[in-house]
Image (spheres, grey):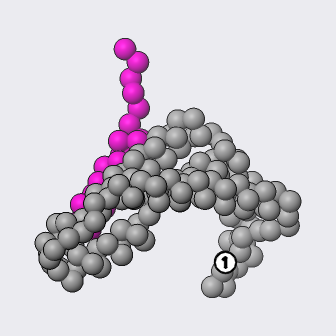
């Protein structure tokens, strides 16, 4: 059986036991763990393929103007992914176990592959070499828009 421990640091058995009691569905059999990994990998492959296809819509950066290097498509994908994942976790997947296969394939896999803050930081590094202030502005905008998207995903629609 796989049980998460305290990687990289020591932990007392009491704190681990307390964590296991508060999250009884954390422990997975080897078969369920293998299925969970496969489901996340499949969702991640689809999300990454979608991101790759959409990134082809990004205009090629030209010249020395830092604004031409802003990854608008990636920023939009990150905002959309954060919003949709939050909306699903707030709605349809709210009461599902964290190890539920639908939750794993959609949230961890699909949206994990679709959104990419690591690609964003590669773009920020390119902008940094042209304009430090521009890079910081894009980074702040990305973080703020992600937070706003998460907040919007948490809002409930009221029935009329």
Of 114 and 86, the residue lying toward us: 114
Residue 152 is covered by the magenta coloring = yes
Q: Is residue 51 left or right of residue 43?
A: left
Which residue lies at the image location 54% right of the left edge and 57% below the top edge?
49
Location of the C terminus (image quadrant):
top left
Please tell me in which quadrant of the rendered image residue 28 appears.
bottom right
Q: Is residue 80 left or right of residue 85?
A: left
Q: Is residue 117 above or below residue 88?
A: below
Residue 154 shows up from this direction: yes
Which residue lies at the image location 47% right of the left edge and 40% below the top edge?
87
Residue 112 shows up from this direction: no
**Residue 119: % across, % down:** 40, 69
Q: Is residue 85 left or right of residue 57?
A: right
Location of the N terminus (image quadrant):
bottom right
**Residue 55: % across, % down:** 39, 59
Which residue lies at the image location 73% right of the left edge and 59% below the top edge?
38
Of 68 and 132, the residue lying toward us: 68
The magenta segment is: 137-160
Q: Which residue in the protein does label 1 denote? A: 6
Magenta-colored segment: predominant secondary structure: helix
**Residue 106: % across, % down:** 59, 48
Residue 67 is covered by the magenta coloring = no
Q: Is residue 110 above or below residue 67?
A: above
**Residue 99: % across, % down:** 70, 52
Which residue lies at the image location 62% right of the left edge and 53% below the top edge?
43
> Which residue is most to the top?
160
Please tell me in which quadrant of the rendered image residue 95 appears.
top right
Q: How many numbered markers are drawn?
A: 1
Mark 1, secondary structure of its residue: loop
Q: Is residue 7 left or right of residue 30?
A: left
């Amino acid at each position: 059986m796989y049980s998460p421990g305290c990687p990289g640091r020591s932990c007392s058995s009491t704190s681990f036991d307390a964590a296991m009691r508060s999250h009884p569905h954390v422990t997975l059999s080897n078969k369920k763990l293998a299925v969970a990994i496969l489901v996340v990998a499949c969702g991640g492959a689809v999300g990454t393929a979608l991101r790759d296809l959409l990134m082809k819509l990004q205009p090629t950066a030209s010249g020395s103007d830092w604004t031409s290097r802003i990854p608008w498509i990636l920023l939009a994908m990150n905002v959309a992914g954060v919003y949709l994942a939050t909306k699903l976790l707030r709605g349809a997947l709210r009461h599902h176990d964290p190890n539920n296969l639908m939750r794993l394939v959609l949230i961890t896999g699909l949206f994990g592959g679709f959104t990419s803050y690591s690609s964003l930081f590669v773009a920020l590094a390119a902008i940094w070499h042209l304009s430090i202030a521009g890079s910081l502005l894009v980074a702040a905008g990305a973080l703020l828009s992600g937070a706003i998207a998460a907040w919007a995903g948490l809002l409930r629609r009221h029935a009329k």
